[in-house]
Amino acid sequence: MLSLRQLCVELENQPGRLCSVSEAFAAAGISIRVMMLSENEQAGAFRMLVSDLEGARRVVMEMQLPARIEEVIALRIPDEPGSLARVLKPLWEQYINVLHMYAFPVRDGKSLTVFRFSDPDKALGILASEGLQPVEFEDLRKEFSE
């Protein structure tokens, strides 16, 4: 089954922490394709799809930052009322939980939505049965260049 792997780096809520990671990736020639930053009072979670996952992981390990790799699924869904509910309903009916997600509009009236599910393999099967095909990593660049 097809899923993507994203890097999640835990960052202290201090000025410059995000910048230092971004600069380190740039110095290593790593592009951040898609990203999301969320936070609580203690730390931020910087989640991203990068051009070189293993290289990015090495960079953050050298910086001694806690990080993990997470399985995610990206879908192109219509950017219209009700489309998210149509995607989520069959997952909910099979007790698949959405752990986090982020989305943004792309081309052709679609939204690129990245999901992290409680059971990604089962989610992929359900999505396939609904006729939804995940976006492959190689196709992410196309979403922004056309």
Image (spheres, helix red, strand yellow):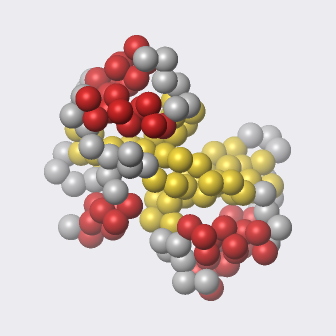
Residue 124 image position (x, y, % from top left): 38, 37
Q: Is residue 61 above or below residue 43?
A: below
Q: Across the whole image, how many numbered discs are drawn on residues? A: 0
Tell me if I can see residue 102 in this picture: no
> In the image, is 27 to the left or to the right of 91?
right
| Outermost left residue | 108
Quadrant occupied by the C terminus: bottom left
- Residue drawn at the location 38% of the way across and 61% of the way down: 137
Residue 121 in view (yes/no): yes
Q: Where does the image place residue 36, in percent across and percent down from the top left?
A: 55, 52
At 53% from the left edge and 47% from the top edge, which residue is drawn?
71
Residue 111: percent from left, percent from top: 30, 45
Q: Is 111 in front, or is 59?
A: 59
Residue drawn 42% across the image and 32% down it = 123
**Lateral position of residue 63 relative to residue 28, left or right:** right
User: In which quadrant of the rendered view does residue 69 lie?
Assistant: bottom right
Q: In which quarter of the image is residue 139?
A: bottom left
